[in-house]
């Protein structure tokens, strides 16, 4: 995923938290806010320190990014998304994270067939 498609700044994270809607399952929490005139969705990923050491947290982030890359063509383009990982993601494989992410995106109607 290209860096221009990531939410990096703290101000942007805070704005999405305050103005956006959220949905969660046992593994992931998603906050999202629609953005007009945006040609590609942007994503911020958050994995807290309680989920393990730096190696584990970075692995979870890589798995989420890979899942997003595989689902990229099905996600609405005009939205900013923040994905927060929960404890069960520490023992999940890429395919399981992909299925969990797909489930949450379908429930928020950000996923289209």
Image (cartoon, rainbow, N blue to C red):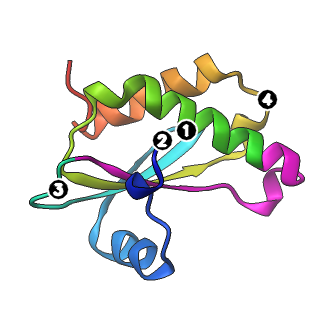
Q: Which numbered disc, 4 or 2, marks the residue closer to the eye?
A: 2
SS at mark 2 in the image: loop
Residue 112 lies left or right of residue 27; in this view the side is: left
Kindly identify which residue carries mark 2: 1
Residue 85 lies left or right of residue 51; in this view the side is: left
Indicate which disc, 4 or 3, sits on the residue closer to the N terminus: 3
Indicate which disc, 1 or 4, sits on the residue closer to the N terminus: 1
Indicate which disc, 1 or 3, sits on the residue closer to the N terminus: 3
Indicate which disc, 2 or 3, sits on the residue closer to the N terminus: 2
Residue farthest to the bottom, as pictured = 11
Q: Front-most of 23 and 34?
A: 34
The C terminus - image quarter:
top left
Question: What's the CA distance linking mark 1 and mark 4?
Answer: 17 Å
Q: Give the range drawn in magenta.
A: 40-57
| Labelled pair 2, 3 in contact (Cβ < 8 Å) | no
Count up the numbered dots: 4
Q: Which residue is drawn at 35% across and 69% down?
A: 16
Say few, some or many: other residues with alpha carbon within 10 Å of mark 3 (under 14 / 14 to 19 / 20 or more). Answer: few
Kindly identify which residue carries mark 3: 38
Instruction: Residue 27: give its label.
Output: none
Say few, some or many: other residues with alpha carbon within 10 Å of mark 4 (under 14 / 14 to 19 / 20 or more). Answer: few
102 to 60, vertically: above or below: above
| Labelled pair 4, 3 in contact (Cβ < 8 Å) | no
Q: Front-most of 109 and 24?
A: 109
Kindly identify which residue carries mark 1: 65
Kindly identify which residue carries mark 4: 91
Question: What's the CA distance linking mark 1 and mark 3?
Answer: 20 Å
Say few, some or many: other residues with alpha carbon within 10 Å of mark 2 (under 14 / 14 to 19 / 20 or more). Answer: few
Q: Which residue is drawn at 70% across and 36% down?
A: 89
| Labelled pair 1, 3 in contact (Cβ < 8 Å) | no
Verify whether residue 45 appears in magenta: yes
Q: Position of residue 53 (x, y in %)?
A: 90, 53
């Amino acid at each position: 995923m290209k860096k221009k498609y990531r939410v990096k700044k703290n101000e942007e994270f805070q704005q999405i938290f305050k103005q956006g809607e959220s949905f969660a399952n046992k593994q992931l929490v998603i906050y999202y806010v629609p953005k007009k005139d945006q040609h590609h969705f942007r994503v911020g990923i958050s994995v807290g320190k309680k989920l393990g050491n730096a190696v584990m947290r970075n692995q979870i982030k890589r798995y989420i990014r890979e899942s997003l890359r595989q689902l990229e063509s099905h996600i609405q383009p005009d939205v900013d998304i923040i994905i927060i990982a929960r404890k069960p993601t520490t023992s999940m494989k890429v395919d399981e994270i992909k299925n969990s992410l797909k489930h949450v995106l379908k429930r928020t109607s950000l996923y289209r067939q």
